Image (cartoon, grey):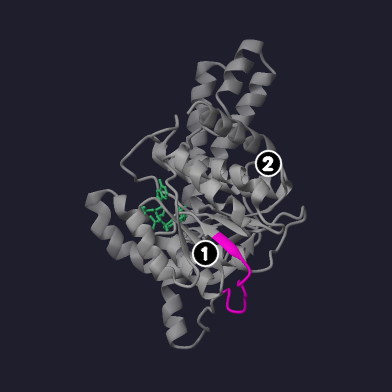
């Protein structure tokens, strides 16, 4: 492509991203209003308070491993599953925090050491839990785009992508053959994943363009990879986060198709915007404003664990291809402008929705897994 055409197309794509964001604003505002009105409506008994999704579940014969279980959504998930009788393996990178979490979770909870910054720790964790034949694996641990450290200590990628996705990919591939017969893998995604779709689709068209041109351009374009292109609408760290969360959706769906060697149900979930420690690295000058203005519309961690708990404990709804549907905590329409409803909104516990994936999902997933294998081989 000529440089002038490339600049024009990148400007148009940037403009398109901003227009798409602007178009979603009214819907997001309505969703925020619904979130703010909900406690009042419940207090006035105009609507019923949302019941715990797992109220009738019996998990006494289930062994469930939760990563990032020392705080936030992970800790809340462990408590709710343990309360229904599950044997919960509480994974944490810090021995003291993990011990405290086990105490808080109660029941049959056990501590398991897991630091996703250390591949040795991931391998040791897999070895330790293999004999237990896990029924559910909840890949929950995560850091968001505001973390101060830029790179993963052992992988040639960002800390965000390495912790949130690559280390989890390694864990799940190591455990795949030792999962129980009807096992499930719950993959924590985020509404933020959507910000990367257009970049991936654009990147795929660039590869198509190169295929139609000379062999040398084709080589360059294919080397660029499909999954590592940042959306014009967000800065690099946001894109790393979005990419890591979209990767979780693709991983869940690939597991359900059997693309990783064994077919197990992979369930992508969005916990919603939760008032957890994940926001502790928000830029200091805006932090107070963030706490005052944003906290009231965010979910508590107990509400935000509903999708993970439902994915672990309830019968799964499936799409036309038999893949488990994506679970989200807000009311989300099945069709139409779904993305904007996923950021914040009216809490329903856990609702099934269709996962949004790039136009050519298989190619994006293949490129993603190839990149993961490359990163792990080079570590
Ligand atoms: N909160 C939200 O608004 C939101 C929105 C969408 C998606 N999510 C996703 O939901 C998941 C849970 O987030 P949260 O809000 O509960 O966050 P959080 O309160 O910060 O908890 C994150 C958990 O991950 C663990 N963790 C971080 N780095 C780790 C590492 N290198 N090795 C092992 N464990 C590590 C933390 O352990 P330590 O206690 O040792 O730090 C903690 O237990 C994440 O995957 C996040 O991306 C959250």
Is residue 253 visible in this depiction of the protein?
no
Decide if ligand 1 comes within 8 Å of the CB at mark 2.
no
Decide if ligand 1 comes within 8 Å of the CB at mark 1.
no
Q: What residue is rendered at 73% in x and 47% in y?
A: 257
Magenta residue span: 53-64
- Between circles 1 and 2, the one closer to the viewer is 1
The disc placed on residue 154 is none
Question: Where is 200 relative to 179, above or below?
Answer: above
Judge the density around disc 2: few (<14), some (14-19), many (≥20) Cα neighbours within 10 Å. some
Q: Check residue 57 for magenta coloring.
A: yes
Question: Residue 35's spot in the image, x, y percent?
Answer: 45, 70
Which secondary structure, mark 2?
Answer: loop
Quadrant in which the N terminus is drawn: top right
Closer to the camera, 191 or 152?
152
Residue placed farthest to the bottom in the image?
45
Label 1 to label 2, Cα distance in Å?
25 Å
Question: Could you tell whether 212 is left or right of 100 in the image?
Answer: right
Q: Earlier in the sequence, mark 1 or mark 2?
A: 1
Closer to the camera, 184 or 360?
184
Residue placed farthest to the left in the image?
285
Q: Quadrant of ligand 1?
A: bottom left
The disc placed on residue 260 is 2
Closer to the camera, 208 or 138?
138
Is residue 163 visible in this depiction of the protein?
yes
The disc placed on residue 88 is 1
Question: Could you tell whether 244 is left or right of 94 in the image?
Answer: right
Judge the density around disc 1: few (<14), some (14-19), many (≥20) Cα neighbours within 10 Å. many
Question: Could you tell whether 43 is left or right of 193 in the image?
Answer: left
Image quadrant assignment for residue 210: top right
Q: What residue is rendered at 55% in x and 64% in y?
A: 307
Question: Where is 208 relative to 291, above or below?
Answer: above
Q: Main secondary structure of the magenta part?
A: loop
């Amino acid at each position: 492509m000529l440089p002038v055409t490339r600049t024009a197309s990148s400007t148009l794509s940037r403009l398109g991203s901003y227009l798409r964001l602007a178009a979603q604003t009214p819907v997001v505002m309505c969703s925020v209003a619904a979130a703010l009105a909900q406690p009042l409506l419940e207090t006035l008994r105009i609507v019923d308070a949302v019941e715990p999704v797992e109220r009738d579940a019996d998990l006494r014969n289930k062994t469930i491993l939760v990563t990032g279980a020392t705080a936030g959504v992970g800790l809340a998930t462990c408590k709710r599953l343990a309360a229904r009788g599950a044997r919960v393996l509480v994974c944490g990178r810090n021995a003291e925090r993990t011990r405290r979490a086990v105490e808080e979770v109660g029941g049959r909870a056990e501590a398991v050491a897991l630091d996703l910054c250390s591949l040795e720790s991931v391998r040791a964790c897999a070895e330790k839990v293999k004999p237990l034949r896990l029924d559910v694996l909840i890949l929950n641990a995560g850091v968001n785009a505001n973390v101060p450290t830029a790179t993963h200590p052992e992988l040639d990628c960002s800390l965000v992508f390495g912790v949130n996705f690559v280390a989890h990919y390694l864990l799940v591939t190591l455990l795949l053959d030792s999962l129980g017969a009807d096992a499930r893998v719950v993959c924590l995604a985020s509404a933020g994943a959507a910000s990367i779709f257009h970049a991936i689709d654009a990147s795929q068209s660039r590869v198509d363009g190169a295929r139609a041109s000379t062999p040398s351009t084709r080589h360059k374009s294919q080397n660029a990879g499909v999954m590592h292109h940042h959306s014009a609408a967000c800065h690099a760290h946001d894109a790393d986060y979005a990419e890591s969360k979209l990767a979780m959706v693709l991983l869940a769906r690939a597991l359900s198709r059997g693309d990783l060697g064994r077919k197990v149900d992979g369930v992508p979930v969005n916990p919603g915007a939760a008032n957890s420690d994940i926001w502790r690295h928000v830029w200091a000058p805006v932090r107070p404003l963030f706490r005052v203005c944003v906290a009231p519309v965010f979910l508590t961690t107990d509400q935000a664990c509903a999708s993970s708990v439902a994915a672990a404990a309830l019968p799964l709804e499936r799409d036309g291809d038999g893949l488990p549907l994506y679970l989200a905590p807000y009311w989300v329409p099945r069709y139409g402008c779904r993305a904007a409803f996923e950021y914040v909104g009216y809490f329903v516990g856990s609702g099934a929705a269709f996962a949004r994936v790039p136009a050519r999902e298989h190619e994006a997933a293949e490129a993603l897994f190839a990149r993961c294998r490359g990163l792990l081989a080079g570590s």
